[in-house]
Image: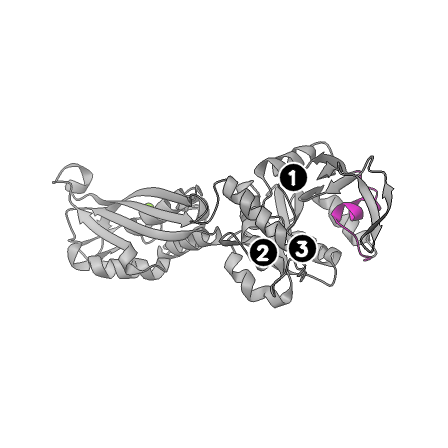
Amino acid sequence: MDTAAIIVAAGRGSRAGGAVAKQWRDLDGRMVLARSCAALAAAGLHRQVLVIHPDDAARAQALVGPEMMIVEGGETRSTSVRNALEALATAPPRRVLIHDGARPLVSAALVARVRAALDHALAAAPALPVTDALWRGADGRVQGSAARDGLFRAQTPQGFDFAAILAAYRAHDGARAADDVEIARAAGLDVAIVEGDDDNLKLTWPTDFDRAARLLRARGNAAPDGGPMDIRTGNGFDVHRFGPGTGCWLCGVLVPHDRALQGHSDADVGLHALSDAIYGALAEGDIGRHFPPSDPQWKGAESHIFLRHAADLARAQGFTLGNVDVTLICERPKIGPHADAMRARVAGIARLDPARVSVKATTSERLGFTGREEGIAALATATLWRA
Ligand code: MG
Protein backbone atom coordinates (compact mmCIF):
# COMPACT_ATOMS: atom_id res chain seq x y z
CA MET A 1 0.00 0.00 0.00
CA ASP A 2 1.54 3.24 -1.16
CA THR A 3 -0.18 5.87 0.98
CA ALA A 4 -1.97 5.45 4.31
CA ALA A 5 -4.11 7.93 6.22
CA ILE A 6 -4.13 8.71 9.93
CA ILE A 7 -7.33 10.30 11.20
CA VAL A 8 -6.85 12.01 14.54
CA ALA A 9 -10.03 11.89 16.61
CA ALA A 10 -8.82 11.38 20.17
CA GLY A 11 -9.74 14.87 21.40
CA ARG A 12 -12.56 15.47 23.84
CA GLY A 13 -13.05 19.11 22.85
CA SER A 14 -16.57 20.41 23.29
CA ARG A 15 -16.27 24.03 22.16
CA ALA A 16 -18.78 23.07 19.48
CA GLY A 17 -21.33 22.55 22.26
CA GLY A 18 -23.13 19.36 23.27
CA ALA A 19 -22.10 16.58 25.61
CA VAL A 20 -20.38 14.48 22.96
CA ALA A 21 -17.04 15.45 21.39
CA LYS A 22 -17.59 17.13 18.02
CA GLN A 23 -16.14 14.35 15.84
CA TRP A 24 -18.79 11.93 17.12
CA ARG A 25 -21.71 14.28 16.57
CA ASP A 26 -24.21 14.18 13.75
CA LEU A 27 -23.65 16.41 10.76
CA ASP A 28 -26.64 16.49 8.45
CA GLY A 29 -27.62 12.87 9.02
CA ARG A 30 -24.20 11.27 9.34
CA MET A 31 -21.51 11.22 12.02
CA VAL A 32 -18.73 13.78 11.47
CA LEU A 33 -16.01 11.16 11.78
CA ALA A 34 -17.78 8.77 9.38
CA ARG A 35 -17.82 11.60 6.86
CA SER A 36 -14.10 12.32 7.38
CA CYS A 37 -13.15 8.65 6.91
CA ALA A 38 -15.41 8.29 3.87
CA ALA A 39 -14.04 11.48 2.29
CA LEU A 40 -10.49 10.16 2.52
CA ALA A 41 -11.57 6.75 1.18
CA ALA A 42 -13.31 8.49 -1.72
CA ALA A 43 -10.01 10.26 -2.40
CA GLY A 44 -8.31 6.87 -2.72
CA LEU A 45 -6.96 6.52 0.83
CA HIS A 46 -8.37 3.14 1.86
CA ARG A 47 -5.77 2.10 4.43
CA GLN A 48 -6.75 4.16 7.46
CA VAL A 49 -5.68 4.38 11.08
CA LEU A 50 -8.27 5.99 13.30
CA VAL A 51 -6.91 7.39 16.57
CA ILE A 52 -9.56 7.60 19.28
CA HIS A 53 -9.91 8.26 22.98
CA PRO A 54 -10.22 4.93 24.88
CA ASP A 55 -13.68 5.99 26.11
CA ASP A 56 -14.90 6.07 22.49
CA ALA A 57 -13.99 2.45 21.63
CA ALA A 58 -17.63 1.32 21.45
CA ARG A 59 -18.61 4.25 19.22
CA ALA A 60 -15.73 3.53 16.87
CA GLN A 61 -16.97 0.01 16.12
CA ALA A 62 -19.57 1.51 13.80
CA LEU A 63 -16.78 2.88 11.62
CA VAL A 64 -14.54 -0.16 11.31
CA GLY A 65 -13.95 -1.27 7.74
CA PRO A 66 -11.73 -4.01 6.33
CA GLU A 67 -8.72 -1.75 5.87
CA MET A 68 -9.16 0.36 9.01
CA MET A 69 -7.14 0.00 12.19
CA ILE A 70 -8.22 1.57 15.49
CA VAL A 71 -5.50 2.93 17.76
CA GLU A 72 -5.86 4.54 21.18
CA GLY A 73 -4.63 8.09 21.49
CA GLY A 74 -2.49 9.58 24.21
CA GLU A 75 -2.50 12.64 26.45
CA THR A 76 -1.58 15.03 23.65
CA ARG A 77 -2.18 15.18 19.91
CA SER A 78 1.47 14.38 19.25
CA THR A 79 1.33 11.23 21.41
CA SER A 80 -1.80 10.17 19.53
CA VAL A 81 -0.17 10.59 16.14
CA ARG A 82 2.98 8.85 17.37
CA ASN A 83 0.87 5.83 18.43
CA ALA A 84 -0.71 5.68 14.97
CA LEU A 85 2.65 5.95 13.20
CA GLU A 86 4.07 3.13 15.32
CA ALA A 87 1.02 0.99 14.49
CA LEU A 88 1.68 1.52 10.77
CA ALA A 89 5.41 0.88 11.15
CA THR A 90 4.92 -2.90 11.27
CA ALA A 91 3.93 -2.76 7.56
CA PRO A 92 5.12 0.70 6.62
CA PRO A 93 3.48 2.61 3.76
CA ARG A 94 5.63 4.82 1.57
CA ARG A 95 3.71 7.93 2.55
CA VAL A 96 1.19 8.98 5.16
CA LEU A 97 -1.42 11.74 5.23
CA ILE A 98 -2.43 12.92 8.71
CA HIS A 99 -5.89 14.45 8.97
CA ASP A 100 -8.06 16.07 11.63
CA GLY A 101 -11.16 13.95 12.22
CA ALA A 102 -13.15 17.18 12.58
CA ARG A 103 -12.55 18.19 8.94
CA PRO A 104 -15.24 16.12 7.19
CA LEU A 105 -15.46 18.27 4.07
CA VAL A 106 -11.98 17.53 2.76
CA SER A 107 -12.14 17.15 -1.01
CA ALA A 108 -10.52 14.56 -3.26
CA ALA A 109 -8.90 17.45 -5.16
CA LEU A 110 -7.17 18.74 -2.02
CA VAL A 111 -5.94 15.23 -1.14
CA ALA A 112 -4.62 14.88 -4.71
CA ARG A 113 -2.71 18.19 -4.42
CA VAL A 114 -1.00 17.04 -1.21
CA ARG A 115 -0.11 13.67 -2.73
CA ALA A 116 1.22 15.28 -5.91
CA ALA A 117 3.44 17.62 -3.88
CA LEU A 118 4.94 14.59 -2.13
CA ASP A 119 6.41 13.53 -5.49
CA HIS A 120 8.89 16.39 -5.00
CA ALA A 121 9.07 16.89 -1.23
CA LEU A 122 9.29 14.82 1.95
CA ALA A 123 6.52 16.91 3.51
CA ALA A 124 3.62 18.94 2.12
CA ALA A 125 0.59 20.53 3.75
CA PRO A 126 -2.37 22.64 2.62
CA ALA A 127 -2.81 26.22 3.78
CA LEU A 128 -4.54 29.44 2.79
CA PRO A 129 -2.98 32.90 2.98
CA VAL A 130 -4.50 35.16 5.63
CA THR A 131 -6.51 37.84 3.86
CA ASP A 132 -8.35 39.50 6.76
CA ALA A 133 -6.57 42.17 8.78
CA LEU A 134 -5.22 40.87 12.08
CA TRP A 135 -5.83 42.60 15.41
CA ARG A 136 -4.82 42.06 18.93
CA GLY A 137 -7.75 42.52 21.25
CA ALA A 138 -8.78 42.24 24.88
CA ASP A 139 -11.93 42.97 26.85
CA GLY A 140 -13.87 43.60 23.64
CA ARG A 141 -11.48 46.35 22.51
CA VAL A 142 -8.91 46.51 19.73
CA GLN A 143 -5.46 46.78 21.28
CA GLY A 144 -3.40 46.92 18.12
CA SER A 145 -2.85 45.30 14.76
CA ALA A 146 -0.42 42.75 13.39
CA ALA A 147 1.09 42.32 9.95
CA ARG A 148 -0.48 39.48 7.99
CA ASP A 149 2.24 39.31 5.32
CA GLY A 150 3.51 35.78 4.92
CA LEU A 151 0.93 34.35 7.32
CA PHE A 152 -1.05 31.22 6.42
CA ARG A 153 -3.96 29.31 7.92
CA ALA A 154 -2.82 25.69 8.18
CA GLN A 155 -5.13 22.83 7.22
CA THR A 156 -4.98 19.06 6.98
CA PRO A 157 -4.33 16.46 5.64
CA GLN A 158 -0.63 17.08 6.11
CA GLY A 159 1.41 14.65 4.03
CA PHE A 160 4.79 13.10 4.69
CA ASP A 161 7.28 10.53 3.59
CA PHE A 162 6.49 7.83 6.15
CA ALA A 163 10.04 7.07 7.24
CA ALA A 164 10.82 10.78 7.59
CA ILE A 165 7.81 11.66 9.77
CA LEU A 166 8.23 8.50 11.89
CA ALA A 167 11.84 9.51 12.56
CA ALA A 168 10.73 13.07 13.37
CA TYR A 169 8.17 11.82 15.91
CA ARG A 170 10.64 9.40 17.48
CA ALA A 171 13.10 12.28 17.88
CA HIS A 172 10.47 14.65 19.27
CA ASP A 173 10.75 15.54 22.95
CA GLY A 174 7.02 15.14 23.58
CA ALA A 175 6.32 18.84 24.05
CA ARG A 176 2.96 20.06 22.78
CA ALA A 177 2.98 20.86 19.07
CA ALA A 178 0.31 22.63 17.04
CA ASP A 179 0.40 20.08 14.25
CA ASP A 180 2.52 17.53 12.42
CA VAL A 181 4.24 20.20 10.35
CA GLU A 182 5.69 21.69 13.55
CA ILE A 183 7.16 18.30 14.49
CA ALA A 184 8.46 17.75 10.96
CA ARG A 185 10.16 21.14 10.96
CA ALA A 186 11.67 20.53 14.39
CA ALA A 187 13.39 17.53 12.78
CA GLY A 188 14.70 19.71 9.95
CA LEU A 189 12.18 18.65 7.27
CA ASP A 190 11.35 21.15 4.57
CA VAL A 191 7.54 21.47 4.22
CA ALA A 192 5.96 22.48 0.91
CA ILE A 193 2.78 24.57 1.05
CA VAL A 194 -0.02 23.45 -1.24
CA GLU A 195 -3.21 25.40 -1.91
CA GLY A 196 -5.82 24.77 0.79
CA ASP A 197 -9.58 24.89 0.42
CA ASP A 198 -11.89 27.31 2.22
CA ASP A 199 -14.56 24.60 2.46
CA ASN A 200 -12.17 22.28 4.32
CA LEU A 201 -13.22 23.83 7.61
CA LYS A 202 -12.41 22.38 11.01
CA LEU A 203 -15.62 22.02 13.01
CA THR A 204 -14.95 23.97 16.18
CA TRP A 205 -17.93 26.18 17.02
CA PRO A 206 -21.69 25.47 16.77
CA THR A 207 -21.95 27.78 13.75
CA ASP A 208 -19.36 25.63 11.94
CA PHE A 209 -21.87 22.76 11.91
CA ASP A 210 -24.45 24.99 10.25
CA ARG A 211 -21.99 26.12 7.61
CA ALA A 212 -20.78 22.57 6.96
CA ALA A 213 -24.38 21.36 6.55
CA ARG A 214 -25.04 24.14 4.02
CA LEU A 215 -21.92 23.18 2.06
CA LEU A 216 -22.92 19.49 2.05
CA ARG A 217 -26.37 20.34 0.73
CA ALA A 218 -24.86 22.49 -1.98
CA ARG A 219 -22.83 19.43 -3.02
CA GLY A 220 -25.97 17.33 -3.29
CA ASN A 221 -24.77 15.06 -0.49
CA ALA A 222 -27.37 15.90 2.06
CA ALA A 223 -30.06 14.43 4.27
CA PRO A 224 -33.43 13.48 2.75
CA ASP A 225 -34.97 16.86 3.54
CA GLY A 226 -32.07 18.81 2.12
CA GLY A 227 -31.29 17.22 -1.22
CA PRO A 228 -30.89 13.94 -3.06
CA MET A 229 -29.69 10.85 -1.23
CA ASP A 230 -26.76 8.85 -2.54
CA ILE A 231 -28.65 5.89 -4.05
CA ARG A 232 -26.73 3.04 -5.68
CA THR A 233 -27.65 -0.10 -7.54
CA GLY A 234 -25.33 -2.95 -8.42
CA ASN A 235 -25.74 -6.16 -10.35
CA GLY A 236 -24.00 -9.50 -10.15
CA PHE A 237 -23.88 -12.58 -12.35
CA ASP A 238 -22.33 -15.98 -11.67
CA VAL A 239 -22.25 -19.51 -13.08
CA HIS A 240 -21.09 -22.79 -11.60
CA ARG A 241 -21.00 -26.17 -13.34
CA PHE A 242 -22.48 -29.40 -12.04
CA GLY A 243 -20.33 -32.28 -10.87
CA PRO A 244 -20.88 -35.38 -8.80
CA GLY A 245 -22.61 -34.92 -5.45
CA THR A 246 -25.83 -35.10 -3.50
CA GLY A 247 -26.89 -31.47 -3.18
CA CYS A 248 -26.24 -27.83 -4.10
CA TRP A 249 -25.64 -24.83 -1.86
CA LEU A 250 -27.99 -22.15 -3.17
CA CYS A 251 -28.51 -18.85 -1.30
CA GLY A 252 -27.10 -20.39 1.87
CA VAL A 253 -29.38 -23.46 1.82
CA LEU A 254 -28.25 -27.00 0.96
CA VAL A 255 -30.79 -28.23 -1.61
CA PRO A 256 -30.83 -32.03 -2.14
CA HIS A 257 -30.06 -32.96 -5.75
CA ASP A 258 -28.43 -35.78 -7.70
CA ARG A 259 -25.45 -33.53 -8.44
CA ALA A 260 -23.46 -30.73 -6.75
CA LEU A 261 -22.07 -27.44 -8.00
CA GLN A 262 -18.30 -27.31 -8.39
CA GLY A 263 -16.09 -24.37 -7.49
CA HIS A 264 -13.23 -23.07 -5.43
CA SER A 265 -15.55 -22.25 -2.52
CA ASP A 266 -18.85 -24.00 -1.73
CA ALA A 267 -19.96 -22.81 -5.22
CA ASP A 268 -23.07 -21.03 -3.93
CA VAL A 269 -23.87 -19.30 -7.18
CA GLY A 270 -26.70 -17.22 -5.62
CA LEU A 271 -24.60 -15.77 -2.80
CA HIS A 272 -21.76 -15.08 -5.23
CA ALA A 273 -23.97 -13.11 -7.60
CA LEU A 274 -25.48 -11.21 -4.66
CA SER A 275 -22.12 -10.38 -3.08
CA ASP A 276 -20.91 -9.08 -6.44
CA ALA A 277 -24.05 -6.94 -6.75
CA ILE A 278 -23.24 -5.22 -3.44
CA TYR A 279 -19.57 -4.79 -4.31
CA GLY A 280 -20.73 -3.41 -7.65
CA ALA A 281 -22.98 -0.81 -6.02
CA LEU A 282 -19.98 0.31 -3.96
CA ALA A 283 -17.64 0.24 -6.98
CA GLU A 284 -15.47 -2.08 -4.89
CA GLY A 285 -14.74 -4.72 -7.51
CA ASP A 286 -15.95 -8.27 -6.94
CA ILE A 287 -15.49 -11.27 -4.63
CA GLY A 288 -12.22 -12.17 -6.32
CA ARG A 289 -10.71 -8.83 -5.33
CA HIS A 290 -11.56 -9.23 -1.65
CA PHE A 291 -11.06 -13.02 -1.43
CA PRO A 292 -8.46 -13.95 -4.08
CA PRO A 293 -8.96 -17.53 -5.39
CA SER A 294 -5.15 -17.79 -5.41
CA ASP A 295 -5.27 -17.66 -1.60
CA PRO A 296 -5.67 -21.24 -0.30
CA GLN A 297 -7.49 -20.06 2.83
CA TRP A 298 -10.67 -19.48 0.75
CA LYS A 299 -10.66 -23.00 -0.76
CA GLY A 300 -13.94 -24.63 0.21
CA ALA A 301 -15.01 -21.42 1.97
CA GLU A 302 -18.62 -21.07 2.97
CA SER A 303 -20.04 -18.27 0.86
CA HIS A 304 -21.89 -16.53 3.68
CA ILE A 305 -18.45 -15.09 4.52
CA PHE A 306 -18.46 -13.20 1.21
CA LEU A 307 -21.99 -11.83 1.59
CA ARG A 308 -21.40 -10.75 5.20
CA HIS A 309 -18.18 -8.99 4.15
CA ALA A 310 -19.91 -7.14 1.30
CA ALA A 311 -22.81 -6.06 3.55
CA ASP A 312 -20.43 -4.93 6.31
CA LEU A 313 -18.34 -3.00 3.79
CA ALA A 314 -21.48 -1.17 2.64
CA ARG A 315 -22.37 -0.27 6.22
CA ALA A 316 -18.80 0.84 6.98
CA GLN A 317 -19.19 3.33 4.13
CA GLY A 318 -22.42 4.66 5.62
CA PHE A 319 -24.81 2.81 3.31
CA THR A 320 -28.06 1.10 4.20
CA LEU A 321 -29.01 -1.96 2.17
CA GLY A 322 -32.43 -1.18 0.71
CA ASN A 323 -33.30 -4.49 -0.92
CA VAL A 324 -31.75 -7.40 -2.76
CA ASP A 325 -33.17 -9.60 -5.51
CA VAL A 326 -31.69 -12.91 -6.69
CA THR A 327 -32.78 -14.96 -9.71
CA LEU A 328 -31.55 -18.54 -10.02
CA ILE A 329 -31.60 -20.00 -13.54
CA CYS A 330 -31.88 -23.79 -13.75
CA GLU A 331 -34.17 -26.65 -14.77
CA ARG A 332 -33.45 -28.62 -11.60
CA PRO A 333 -33.41 -28.72 -8.64
CA LYS A 334 -36.75 -27.00 -8.15
CA ILE A 335 -36.20 -23.78 -6.19
CA GLY A 336 -39.77 -22.89 -5.22
CA PRO A 337 -40.04 -25.20 -2.19
CA HIS A 338 -36.80 -23.72 -0.77
CA ALA A 339 -37.24 -20.06 -1.71
CA ASP A 340 -38.53 -18.88 1.68
CA ALA A 341 -35.73 -20.68 3.51
CA MET A 342 -33.25 -19.00 1.15
CA ARG A 343 -34.80 -15.58 1.77
CA ALA A 344 -34.55 -16.08 5.53
CA ARG A 345 -30.93 -17.25 5.27
CA VAL A 346 -29.88 -14.32 3.04
CA ALA A 347 -31.68 -11.90 5.38
CA GLY A 348 -29.79 -13.36 8.34
CA ILE A 349 -26.40 -13.14 6.69
CA ALA A 350 -26.86 -9.62 5.33
CA ARG A 351 -28.73 -8.44 8.46
CA LEU A 352 -31.81 -7.44 6.46
CA ASP A 353 -35.53 -7.69 7.01
CA PRO A 354 -36.68 -10.77 4.97
CA ALA A 355 -39.31 -8.51 3.40
CA ARG A 356 -36.41 -6.79 1.62
CA VAL A 357 -34.98 -10.03 0.24
CA SER A 358 -36.29 -11.70 -2.91
CA VAL A 359 -35.20 -15.11 -4.20
CA LYS A 360 -36.89 -16.40 -7.33
CA ALA A 361 -36.08 -18.83 -10.10
CA THR A 362 -36.63 -19.42 -13.76
CA THR A 363 -35.74 -22.10 -16.28
CA SER A 364 -34.21 -21.27 -19.65
CA GLU A 365 -36.80 -23.33 -21.53
CA ARG A 366 -34.30 -26.19 -21.90
CA LEU A 367 -32.07 -23.87 -23.97
CA GLY A 368 -28.36 -23.32 -23.45
CA PHE A 369 -26.09 -24.69 -20.72
CA THR A 370 -28.68 -24.26 -17.99
CA GLY A 371 -31.27 -25.94 -20.21
CA ARG A 372 -28.94 -28.89 -20.75
CA GLU A 373 -28.44 -29.03 -16.96
CA GLU A 374 -24.70 -28.48 -17.21
CA GLY A 375 -24.76 -25.86 -14.45
CA ILE A 376 -26.69 -23.13 -12.68
CA ALA A 377 -26.55 -19.39 -13.35
CA ALA A 378 -27.61 -16.59 -11.00
CA LEU A 379 -28.39 -12.92 -11.39
CA ALA A 380 -28.64 -10.47 -8.52
CA THR A 381 -29.43 -6.81 -7.94
CA ALA A 382 -28.82 -4.77 -4.79
CA THR A 383 -29.94 -1.25 -3.92
CA LEU A 384 -28.03 0.78 -1.34
CA TRP A 385 -28.66 4.27 -0.03
CA ARG A 386 -26.82 6.79 2.08
CA ALA A 387 -28.23 10.01 3.46
MG1 MG B 1 -18.82 -18.09 -8.18
Mark 1 and ligand 1: say if the CB distance to the nearest ligand atom is below 8 Å. no
User: Among all residues in the image, which is located at the extreme front?
Assistant: 141
Q: Nearer the viewer, residue 137 or 17?
A: 137
Among the two numbered marks 3 and 2 on one chain, the one whose residue lies closer to the N terminus? 2
Residue matched to label 1? 198
Residue matched to label 2? 69
User: Among all residues in the image, which is located at the extreme bottom?
Assistant: 55
Spatial CA distance of label 3 from label 2 is 9 Å
In what element is the residue under mark 1? loop
Spatial CA distance of label 1 from label 2 is 29 Å
Quadrant (top left, top right, bottom left, bottom right) of the N terminus: top right
In what element is the residue under mark 3? helix
For the point 15% across and 50% down, the residue is: 332
What's the residue type where badge 2 is placed? Met
In the image, is 115 to the left or to the right of 183?
A: left
What's the residue type where badge 3 is placed? Ala
Front position among marks 1 and 3: 1
Q: Nearer the viewer, residue 236 or 53?
A: 53
Q: Nearer the viewer, residue 144 or 1?
A: 144
In the image, residue 339 above or below residue 293: below
Among the two numbered marks 1 and 2 on one chain, the one whose residue lies closer to the N terminus? 2
Front position among marks 1 and 2: 1
Q: Position of residue 69 (x, y in %)?
A: 58, 56
Residue 182 falls inside the magenta stretch: yes
For the point 33% across and 42% down, the residue is: 235
Q: Position of residue 17 (x, y in %)?
A: 63, 61
Residue matched to label 3? 84
- The residue segment tinted magenta is 174-190
Q: Position of residue 30 (x, y in %)?
A: 50, 53
